[in-house]
Amino acid sequence: MIDKSSIPDMERFMELPQHSKFIIMRLSKLGKTQVWLARECGCSAQHINNILVGRALPSLKLMCRICATLNMEVLVVFKEVFEDAGLSELEKFSGAK
């Protein structure tokens, strides 16, 4: 069951980037925090927060660390980031759908 107290109010949540929604929901499902994720990924909690609220984009290396830590697919979680960068063709080469 998802702890709704860890999810921002619905209106703000819906305005977040898609990758943020995936990550927040996964953290909630796992019962983990942004601080935990930052520690596991080797970055600051502030940087994770900036990524989740849309103030920053992670490097490709950090995208991979976040997804590996949360057991998620990079091309699924960060799909809109790749599309915005014109890299949606990566799916053809990665086998992701």
Image (tube, grey):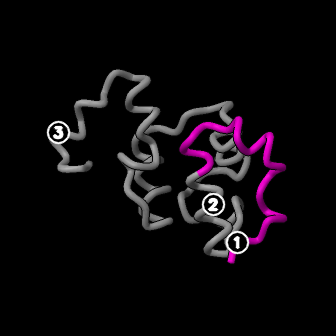
State the image coordinates of residue 89 (x, y, percent, origin top left). 23, 30
How far is the residue under mark 2 from the one under mark 3?
27 Å
Q: Is residue 21 above or below residue 15?
A: below
Query: Residue sitting at 53 percent across and 58 percent down?
Result: 41
Tag 2 and tag 1, C-beta contact below 8 Å: yes
Which tag, 2 or 1, sits closer to the chain's start? Answer: 1
Which tag, 2 or 3, sits closer to the chain's start? Answer: 2
Q: Amino acid at mark 1?
A: Ile
State the image coordinates of residue 55 (x, y, percent, origin top left). 68, 31
Q: Amino acid at mark 2?
A: Met
Q: Nearer the viewer, residue 24 or 68?
A: 24
Residue on which disc 3 sits: 92
> Which secondary structure, mark 1?
loop
Mark 1: give few (<14), some (14-19) or many (20+) Cα within 10 Å.
few
Residue on which disc 1 sits: 2
Query: Residue sitting at 39 percent across and 49 percent down?
Result: 76
Q: Which residues are magenta?
A: 1-21
Q: Quadrant of residue 15?
A: top right
> In the image, is 70 to the left or to the right of 32?
left
Q: Residue 56 bears which disc, if any?
A: none
Q: Is residue 41 above or below residue 95?
A: below
Mark 2: give few (<14), some (14-19) or many (20+) Cα within 10 Å.
some
> In the image, is 50 to the left or to the right of 68?
right
Tag 3 and tag 1, C-beta contact below 8 Å: no
> Which secondary structure, mark 2?
helix
Query: Residue sitting at 79 percent across and 62 percent down?
Result: 6
State the image coordinates of residue 13 (x, y, percent, origin top left). 74, 45
State the image coordinates of residue 79 (x, y, percent, origin top left). 41, 39
Q: Amino acid at mark 3?
A: Lys
* Magenta segment, prevailing SS (helix, strand or loop): helix
Q: Residue 25 bears which disc, if any?
A: 2
